[in-house]
């Protein structure tokens, strides 16, 4: 395996050198493709051609690995086609705080009471969340489709804040809490206490999401700038406290130690 790695690096280096020279206007023959033992490689010079021939015959494992990689990429691509909108949304970078809301919960009109007046393109946004094909989707312009997608994100956030106050929702957030998906408290004396997402207001577009530390009972900005752009109303002011009431054994003792400023070892006088 070490020898194969060395050959690969040598070939990559030689190819880069010849390609750079070619781009700079050197008089090497034009780039053409040759096939040796099922490996298509660029031939820039006869010596390179011979070297490729030797390597491809001596190490056919390279071709096998490339075929395996292509198969894996095809499998991953096919898996991605079957992903629901909810799973796709929750797996986006910056959306780690969200849990996946059950379709049954969303399909119950009682759980969506009052949301139609808050979200534009409500019906289309709901269809998008539930992966329902809309008959009017092809009639929308690109700008209107973007508005529907934005409305779907807002609608899902407003559904999410209600869902995480239910038994299933809190249970789903418990798993994320145990996996430290919400981050840890940045305060030194909290010793990496896992945090919970919280909003400073229940009104959309009022403030971004923060993380609440159960140990020092204070809130902080998330470390990720992507998470810092999420609306705090999608988690609300109630969730972390209801969560700790539900799982009382997870509530840590309140932090008592605090930092004491000193100058040359002497405490500073407080006026």
Image (cartoon, helix red, strand yellow):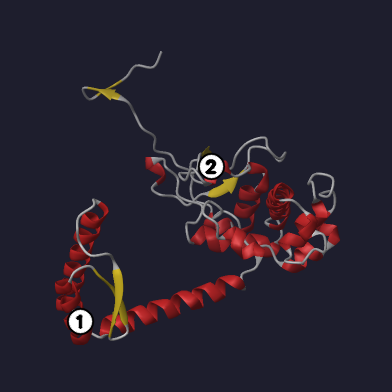
Residue 189 in the image: state x and y as whole percent: 38, 42
What is the CA distance from the residue labelled 2 to the residue labelled 1?
54 Å
Q: Earlier in the sequence, mark 2 or mark 1?
A: 1
Q: Residues at badges 2 and 1 in contact (C-beta under 8 Å)?
A: no
The image quadrant of residue 172 is: bottom right
Q: Is residue 151 visible?
A: yes
Residue on which disc 2 sits = 228
Q: Quadrant of the C terminus?
A: top left
Residue 262 in the image: state x and y as whole percent: 28, 24
Of 7 and 15, nearer the camera is 15
Tell me the residue at 85%/60% (across/down).
109
Residue 11 in the image: state x and y as whole percent: 19, 69
Q: Secondary structure at mark 1?
A: helix
Tell me the residue at 74%/65% (across/down).
130
**Residue most extreme to the top:** 271
Q: Secondary structure at mark 2?
A: helix
Question: Looking at the rendered structure, which numbered label has been put on residue 53?
Answer: 1
Residue 193 in the image: state x and y as whole percent: 44, 50
Tell me the residue at 14%/73% (across/down).
47
């Amino acid at each position: 395996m070490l020898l194969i790695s060395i050959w690969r690096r040598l070939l990559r280096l030689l190819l880069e050198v010849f390609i750079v020279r070619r781009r700079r206007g050197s008089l090497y023959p034009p780039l053409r493709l040759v096939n040796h033992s099922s490996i298509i490689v660029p031939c820039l010079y006869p010596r390179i051609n011979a070297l490729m021939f030797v390597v491809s015959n001596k190490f056919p494992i390279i071709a096998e690995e490339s075929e395996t990689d292509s198969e894996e990429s095809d499998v991953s691509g096919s898996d991605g086609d079957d992903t629901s909108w909810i799973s796709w949304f929750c797996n986006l970078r910056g959306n780690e705080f969200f849990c996946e809301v059950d379709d049954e919960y969303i399909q119950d009109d009682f759980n969506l009471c009052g949301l139609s007046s808050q979200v534009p393109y409500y019906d289309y946004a709901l269809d998008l969340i539930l992966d329902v094909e809309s008959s009017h989707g092809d009639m929308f312009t690109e700008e209107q489709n973007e508005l529907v997608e934005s409305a779907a994100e807002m609608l899902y956030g407003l559904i999410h804040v209600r869902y995480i106050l239910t038994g299933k929702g809190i249970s789903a957030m418990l798993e994320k809490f145990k996996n430290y998906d919400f981050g840890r408290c940045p305060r030194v004396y909290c010793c990496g206490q896992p945090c919970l997402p919280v909003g400073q207001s229940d009104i959309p577009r009022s403030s971004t999401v923060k993380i609440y530390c159960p140990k020092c009972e204070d809130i902080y900005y998330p470390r990720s700038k992507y998470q810092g752009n999420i609306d705090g109303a999608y988690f609300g002011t109630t969730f972390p406290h209801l969560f700790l009431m539900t799982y009382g054994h997870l509530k840590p003792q309140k932090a008592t130690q605090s930092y004491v400023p000193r100058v040359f070892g002497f405490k500073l006088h407080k006026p």
